[in-house]
């Protein structure tokens, strides 16, 4: 009877010990893996233009219009870049020939503009954006403080005046379009979230169908691509893989951090004239 009781106790101890080892080792490893995945995703979003964390997140931008903006009228916009203590950030790095890129879109993404504020010193940038109609807009200030990585700060603006009829954002059935005499086809090696992908703009003459091989540098590169999600929460400013290419192919590499509808604008230059190719895609 005593031997049986001792054996039962030893068996119970083995069972409890085994369960404890499983809980402390295997489950804790699973938890660590999940945390690591989330951190990696956040880091990759930063590479594509999301707002930064840690040191870079200390930078702030105050967007101030001199007057209330009205559709069809230009109103001066002052942007003051400061650190977490409210002191001006005075030095910036040139990124593709400019100290700041300002992207302006309507909330339905029907309107797009890529402009470059003038730097007046002491962290102050000034520009007069063009809002074609009244309504809701979103502004993305894209800049690089000296010694830091690229930072993107955004704000929403309510513009007075008559509003345009909202445009529903739907994915294009065909990714070939003609603008300013150029036929442009957009292709992807794949189109899925959280996987680095290559997007390629192939540019031809719309009439002759001959490849265009004399694209000129636009802001120091063959072209620039901006992609914004349908809810305007995700912003990607993508630079080309081969900046010195002259066409007909312009390749860009990026990652879409979440699924959904995105509008993509490719900007290129030929014969001194910049042309913009918009596409809308559904990322699975």
Image: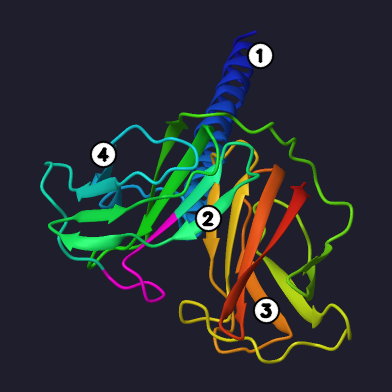
| Residue 93, position as x, y percentages in the image | 28, 71
Going by the image, does 97 lie left or right of 81? right
| Residue occupying image coordinates x 49% and y 42% | 72
Label 3 vs label 4: CA separation? 39 Å
Task: Indicate which label's residue lies in the foreground, 3 or 4.
Answer: 4
Residue 148: image location, x then y, percent: 27, 63
Look at the image and tell me whether residue 221 can be seen.
Answer: yes
Instruction: Choose mark 1 or mark 3, whichever is in front.
Output: 3
* SS label for mark 3: strand
Query: Nearer the N terminus, badge 1 or badge 3?
Result: 1
Is there a contact, CB below 8 Å, between mark 1 and mark 3? Answer: no
Please name the residue that numbered disc 1 is placed on.
Answer: 4
* As drawn, 135 above or below 217: above
Quarter of the image holding residue 118? bottom left
Label 4, label 2: how many angstroms apart (C-alpha)? 20 Å
- Badge number at residue 113: 2
Q: CA distance from mark 1 to mark 2?
A: 83 Å
Judging depth in this view, the residue of 137 and 201 nearest the camera is 137
Secondary structure state at the residue bearing disc 2 = strand
Q: Mark 1 touching mark 2, by CB under 8 A?
A: no
- Sequence order check, earlier mark of 1 and 2: 1
Is the Cβ of the residue at disc 3 closer than 8 Å to that at disc 2?
no
Q: Residue at x 35, y 44 (%)?
A: 75
Dot in front, 3 or 2: 2
Q: Position of residue 1 (x, y in %)?
A: 65, 8
Relative side of 196 to 178, left or right: left
- Which range is magenta? 93-102
Q: Which residue is mark 4?
A: 66
Is residue 62 in the magenta section?
Answer: no
Q: Circle 3 sits on which residue?
A: 250
């Amino acid at each position: 009877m005593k031997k049986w009781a001792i054996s039962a106790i030893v068996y119970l101890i083995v069972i409890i010990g085994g369960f404890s080892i499983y809980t402390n080792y295997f489950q804790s490893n699973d938890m660590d893996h999940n945390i690591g995945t989330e951190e990696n995703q956040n880091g990759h979003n930063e590479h594509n233009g999301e707002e930064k964390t840690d040191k870079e997140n200390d930078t702030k931008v105050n967007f101030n219009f001199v007057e209330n903006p009205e559709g069809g009228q230009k109103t001066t916009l002052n942007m003051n870049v400061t650190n977490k203590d409210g002191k001006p950030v005075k030095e910036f790095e040139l990124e593709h020939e400019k100290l700041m890129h300002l992207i302006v879109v309507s909330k339905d993404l029907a309107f797009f503009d890529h402009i470059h504020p003038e730097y007046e010193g002491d962290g102050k940038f000034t520009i007069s954006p063009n809002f074609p109609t009244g309504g809701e807009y979103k502004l993305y200030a894209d800049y690089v403080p000296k010694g830091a990585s690229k930072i993107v700060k955004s704000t929403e603006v309510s513009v007075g005046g008559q509003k345009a009829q909202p445009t529903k954002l739907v994915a294009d059935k065909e990714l070939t379009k003609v603008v300013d005499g150029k036929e442009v086809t957009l292709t992807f090696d794949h189109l899925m979230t959280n996987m680095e992908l290559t997007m390629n703009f192939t540019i031809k003459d719309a009439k002759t169908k001959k490849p265009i091989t004399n694209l000129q540098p636009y802001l120091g590169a063959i072209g620039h691509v901006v992609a914004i999600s349908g809810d305007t929460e995700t912003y990607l400013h993508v630079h080309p893989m081969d900046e010195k290419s002259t066409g007909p192919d312009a390749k860009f590499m990026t990652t879409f951090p979440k699924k959904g509808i995105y509008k993509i604008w490719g900007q290129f230059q030929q014969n001194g004239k910049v042309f913009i190719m918009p596409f809308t895609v559904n990322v699975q």
